[in-house]
Image (spheres, helix red, strand yellow):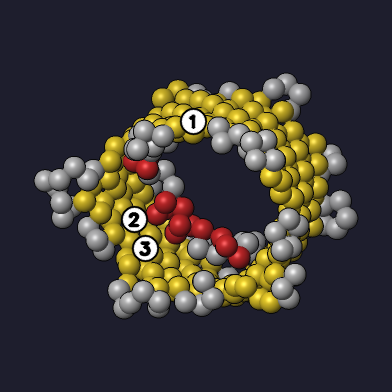
Amino acid sequence: MSVPAFTDIAKAANDLLNKDFYHLSTGTIEVKNTTPNGVAFKVTGKSSHDKATSGAIEGKFTDKANGLTVTQTWNTANTLEAKVELADNVAKGLKAEGVFAFLPNTQSKSAKVNLHFKQSNFHGRAFFDLTKGPTASIDALVGHEGFLAGASVGYNVQQAKITAYSAAVGFNAPTYTAAITATDNLSVFSASYYHKVNKEVEAGAKAAWNSKSGNTVGLEVAAKYRVDPVSFVKAKINDRGVAAIAYNVLLREGVKLGVGASFDTQKLDQATHKVGTSFTFES
């Protein structure tokens, strides 16, 4: 198995616990389309529970022959962003990115340069923000026979000091993964576990402890069941008694529907529940 990025060491468990739960927004719509010349467009819109709306339009062009990808995004906050990626040109496994953003209302600009280097047993990344500091964030993860270990560090070039650091260890197997992370300058600890029980069932859990805020350990467990080839259900609950359920189905080729809800099981007589839906159209 390939070595993931440092922040993805617990990706399987995090995806199971966080993705495809549609109650976070009252409504979400996503439309994807690819033109004959290879430009992929994506339009997204969301309506939050406090009645705020947001949206974005993205266009992506990929030249696989030259390893070039150009992505442009414009959102309802009037932020214009352009991302240029160049992969495997200088060296196999090396990808360079330039990310540039502009806010016309405030005339503020940002420029970032990112480097990714991936080999069979190593995954390293470096992120440079040229307009703030400048600052740098570097992380790396190494792997051997399923065992993973890595660290990250943030550095302010102008002040010449380390601003943040984290560490993580884990184990990846074909049907299960486990990881322990220490973030926020080794003050927030989490342990996660993911298990693909069989083709239909997935299960996972995560425990987290913030050493700065007390002795309470947060716990969350989740499960996913694939009902048939075109639909699945998910459910999760945390130590505070907040539960969430979700259902995703492929209505027809290119059209997906997601519905979800969350409930505070300790306050069922109060209006604390949330309900949301999601439509995805792809052609």
Q: Nearer the viewer, mark 3 or mark 1?
A: 1
Q: Please, which residue is most extreme toward the right here?
A: 90
Q: CA distance from mark 2 to mark 3?
A: 6 Å
Residue 260, position as x, y percentages in the image: 32, 39
Residue 213 lies, with reference to residue 33, above or below; the image says: below
The residue where tag 1 is placed is 45
Q: Which mark is residue 205?
A: 3
Residue 125, position as x, y percentages in the image: 70, 63
Element type at mark 3: strand
| Label located before the other in sequence (2 or 1) | 1
Q: Amino acid at mark 3?
A: Ala
Element type at mark 2: strand
Residue 268, position as x, y percentages in the image: 14, 47
Q: Nearer the viewer, residue 163 or 99?
A: 163
Q: Amino acid at mark 1?
A: Gly
Marks 2 & 1, CB-CB < 8 Å contact = no
The quadrant in which residue 211 appears is bottom left
Residue 21, position as x, y percentages in the image: 38, 44
